[in-house]
């Protein structure tokens, strides 16, 4: 392994920097500027890189190739890049399992031998039987870019419906397999997106889809008029029965599900990422031929859980910002609801069902707390977990006597536990053999004060014996949006950084739901600046408490977290040495014009809607707040050519603008992955390549010594 003395990091940095020149701006590909100006409520806004929104442009394709070449030249000069890639491969190379779930008389689970591009699906008779291959996604493509997106079984387990995604796209297609002999049926469905397959007996399944998109314009806004269908096994897709549509509201989303007793068909509807509406149809009532509204939208969030006879169990935040579980009479939904699990001080994250019991997962200061109740709401027990971490998988069928859940934390690899539903006893079922010593690392939770006085938690993970002298490299990671919590989770990639002496910090920014809907609302719409203030305050706390210093601080985030990174480094470029914005939403004035972007207006606002929303978005939009001549942190932007969630034009425009504005020799690079999307389903080989490049860039630009 490469070792170094205290002087060599500077010498290596100088040598590699010379490859692109001390004046890095002169080495970047020339990005065409056009005379495009838009007017928003009397304010003229220039958009010189508008042409980058056309993914079919030959000029853009040429620019992408040139940018990737510059990035590769820089990264390949880092002397320990190959060694990092090798060590990451060693760390990743261990068997990985999913928790088994009962399907008919078999258990179904996935396994990755270590470095397989995609995990393989198996079934097994009993817990000690010989695993049988169900589906190997690696056989579907030579390069591993076809991924298994989801699987679904009828209660009998006779068939398996599954969806696949190509090159990381959100667009999916579905197939059906006869499980006993592995025979693929003729059923083949296309144009699926944001859907599951929910079975009605063995007859067929419910699913959602859009009208057929224009293949040449898949990154444009083609996500309207979603409809719910029923697919009968053996029928061609064009014969599928239309179950529900709402032509008056073309931008609404619909998901369909049927209760375990097959009595109620439930449709959850949403207009964006916040708020929902629940409709139902009693399939045992021949007089009910249309769906009725159980809970109207879209001021509150609801989640259907189960039915108790002709009553419906729903998780809701109506008069309960931290959520509660209620029992509703569908014949009188506006009548008095029965509280089955009343609101508590901890936020109720989800409710699972198994073995005739309810399993409520709460968040206590951003880590899991799980309680078991009976269907009347009587508390049976609080489930004992190994520590401060994240537990998931508390679901199954009513006839189950056991379930399997997964527990993980920053220094605790995902471990599967077998839970006896009657006794409440957990036993370790499968622990991964990762090539690192978890006892060598410490995880602690700290609370810091944000600009407005809010107390915000963060998790700090580092190697024991860390010296607090301000000279450590620390990476801050955050998301801060869409009601999504950032809970403790194990990352093999992060373990590499930790063993190199780095400090990994996960910040529980406002905008998530770590403390319920109030925490979410404090970081959305007109309050979005609170999220950036929180991250800046976290970085300042790290410096003040001598964990690190600005010349050794890195900040990283993806998607909404990429927006976070872009906004934070615009506002405090002096506070960070390295910036890693990944697949970020960077153009806040036009994000709603692409693919599914319009759905995010409930979280961000819409610049076309009102002057107040325009002013708010314009004030922090990463693309529009870059100032020429400012010395920005060393920046590595990452995106992918098939990202149809946050289209790559966001990252293209942001990179071009930042390269043109950079006021010092610190590099501004973009890494554009091919045949990849927003992140899900990426083959392990691509995951390793990207992780090696990111850690090489972080270490190199913070003066870390590879050991």
Image (cartoon, grey):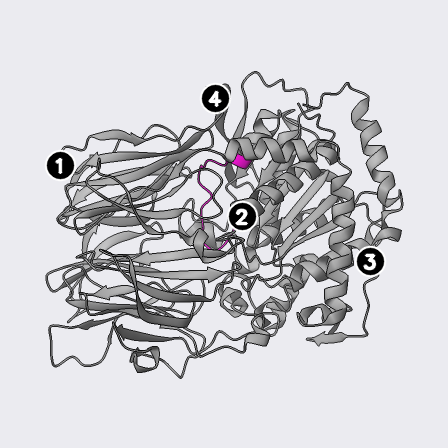
Q: Pointer 4: what residue?
A: 437
Front residue of 538/22: it is 22
Identify the residue shown where x is 54% and y is 70%: 595
Disc 3 to disc 2, how far (Cα)?
31 Å
Q: Which residues are magenta?
A: 479-493
**Do tag 1 and tag 2 residues touch (Cβ < 8 Å)?**
no
Front residue of 29/602: it is 29
Disc 3 to disc 4, how far (Cα)?
45 Å
Is-magenta flag for residue 417?
no
Identify the residue shown where x is 16% and y is 79%: 288
Identify the residue shown where x is 51% and y is 68%: 596
- Asked where in the image residue 31 lies, by quadrant, the reply is bottom right
Q: Residues within 10 Å of mark 1 (few under 14, many from 20)?
A: few
Q: Nearer the viewer, mark 1 or mark 2?
A: 1
Q: Earlier in the sequence, mark 3 or mark 2?
A: 3
Kind of element beneath mark 2: loop
**Do tag 3 and tag 4 residues touch (Cβ < 8 Å)?**
no
Residue 536 position, x and y percent, is 64, 41
Identify the residue shown where x is 67% and y is 20%: 469
Q: Nearer the viewer, mark 4 or mark 1?
A: 4
Disc 1 to disc 2, how far (Cα)?
38 Å
Q: Pointer 3: what residue?
A: 29
Q: Earlier in the sequence, mark 3 or mark 1?
A: 3
Q: Quadrant of the C terminus?
A: top right
Disc 2 to disc 4, how far (Cα)?
28 Å
Disc 4 to disc 1, how far (Cα)?
34 Å
Q: Pointer 2: what residue?
A: 479
Q: Earlier in the sequence, mark 1 or mark 2?
A: 1
Say above or below: 300 vs 235: above
């Amino acid at each position: 392994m490469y070792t170094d003395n205290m002087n060599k990091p500077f010498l290596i940095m100088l040598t590699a920097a010379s490859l692109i020149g001390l004046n890095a701006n002169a080495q970047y590909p020339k990005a065409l500027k056009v005379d495009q100006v838009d007017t928003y409520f009397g304010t003229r806004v220039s958009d010189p890189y508008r042409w980058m929104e056309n993914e079919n442009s030959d000029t853009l394709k040429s620019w992408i190739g040139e940018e990737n070449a510059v990035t590769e030249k820089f990264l390949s000069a880092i002397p320990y890049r190959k060694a990092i890639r090798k060590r990451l491969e060693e760390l990743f190379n261990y068997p990985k399992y999913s928790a088994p779930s009962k399907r008919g008389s078999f258990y179904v689970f996935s396994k990755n031998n270590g470095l397989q591009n995609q995990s393989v699906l198996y079934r097994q008779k009993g817990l000690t039987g010989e695993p049988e291959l169900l589906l190997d996604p690696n056989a579907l493509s030579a390069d591993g870019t076809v991924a298994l997106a989801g699987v679904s079984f009828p209660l009998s387990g006779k068939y398996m419906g599954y969806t696949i995604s190509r090159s990381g796209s959100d667009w999916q297609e579905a197939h059906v397999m006869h499980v006993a002999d592995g025979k693929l049926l003729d059923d083949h469905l296309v144009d699926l997106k944001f859907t599951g397959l929910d079975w009605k007996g063995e007859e067929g399944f419910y699913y959602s889809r859009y009208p057929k998109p224009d293949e040449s314009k898949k990154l444009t806004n083609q996500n309207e008029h979603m409809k719910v269908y029923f697919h009968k096994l053996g029928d061609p897709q064009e014969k599928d029965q239309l179950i529900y549509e709402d032509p008056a509201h073309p931008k609404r989303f619909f998901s369909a599900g049927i209760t375990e007793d097959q009595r109620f068909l439930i449709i959850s509807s949403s207009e964006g990422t916040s708020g929902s509406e629940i409709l139902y149809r009693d399939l045992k009532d021949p007089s009910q031929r249309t769906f009725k509204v159980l809970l109207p939208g879209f001021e509150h969030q609801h989640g259907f859980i189960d039915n108790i006879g002709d009553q419906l169990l729903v998780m809701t935040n109506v008069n309960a910002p931290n959520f509660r579980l209620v029992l509703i009479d569908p014949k009188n939904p506006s009548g008095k609801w029965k509280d089955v699990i009343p609101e508590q001080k901890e936020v109720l994250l989800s409710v699972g069902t198994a073995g005739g019991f309810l399993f409520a997962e709460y968040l206590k200061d951003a880590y899991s707390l799980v309680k078991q109740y009976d269907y009347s709401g009587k508390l049976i027990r609080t489930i004992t977990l190994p520590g401060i971490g994240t537990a998931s998988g508390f679901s199954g069928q009513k006839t189950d006597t056991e379930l399997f859940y997964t527990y993980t934390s920053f220094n605790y690899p995902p471990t599967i536990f077998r839970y006896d539903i009657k006794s409440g006893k957990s036993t370790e079922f499968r622990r991964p053999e990762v090539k690192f010593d978890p006892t060598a690392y410490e995880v602690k939770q700290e609370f810091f004060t944000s600009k407005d006085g809010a107390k915000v938690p963060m998790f700090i993970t580092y190697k024991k014996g860390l010296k607090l002298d301000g000279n450590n490299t620390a990476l801050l990671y955050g998301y801060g949006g869409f009601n999504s919590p950032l809970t403790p989770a194990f990352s093999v990639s992060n373990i590499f950084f930790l063993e190199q002496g780095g400090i990994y910090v996960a910040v529980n920014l406002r905008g998530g739901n770590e403390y319920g809907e109030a925490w979410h609302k404090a970081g959305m719409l007109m309050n979005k600046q609170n999220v950036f203030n929180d991250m800046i305050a976290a970085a300042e706390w790290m410096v003040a408490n001598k964990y690190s210093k600005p010349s050794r601080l890195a900040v990283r985030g993806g998607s909404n977290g990429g927006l976070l990174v872009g906004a934070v480094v615009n506002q405090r470029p002096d506070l960070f040495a390295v910036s890693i914005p990944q697949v970020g939403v960077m153009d806040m004035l036009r994000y709603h014009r692409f693919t599914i972007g319009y759905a995010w207006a409930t979280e961000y606002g819409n610049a076309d809607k009102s002057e107040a929303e325009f002013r708010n978005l314009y004030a922090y939009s990463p693309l529009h707040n870059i100032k020429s001549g400012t010395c920005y942190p060393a920046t590595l932007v990452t995106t992918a050519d098939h990202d149809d969630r946050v289209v790559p034009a966001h990252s293209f425009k942001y990179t071009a603008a930042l390269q043109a504005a950079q006021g010092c020799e610190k590099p501004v690079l973009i890494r554009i992955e091919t045949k990849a999307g927003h992140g899900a389903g990426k083959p392990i080989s691509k995951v390793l390549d990207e992780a090696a490049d990111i850690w090489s860039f972080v270490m190199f630009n913070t003066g870390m010594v590879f050991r």
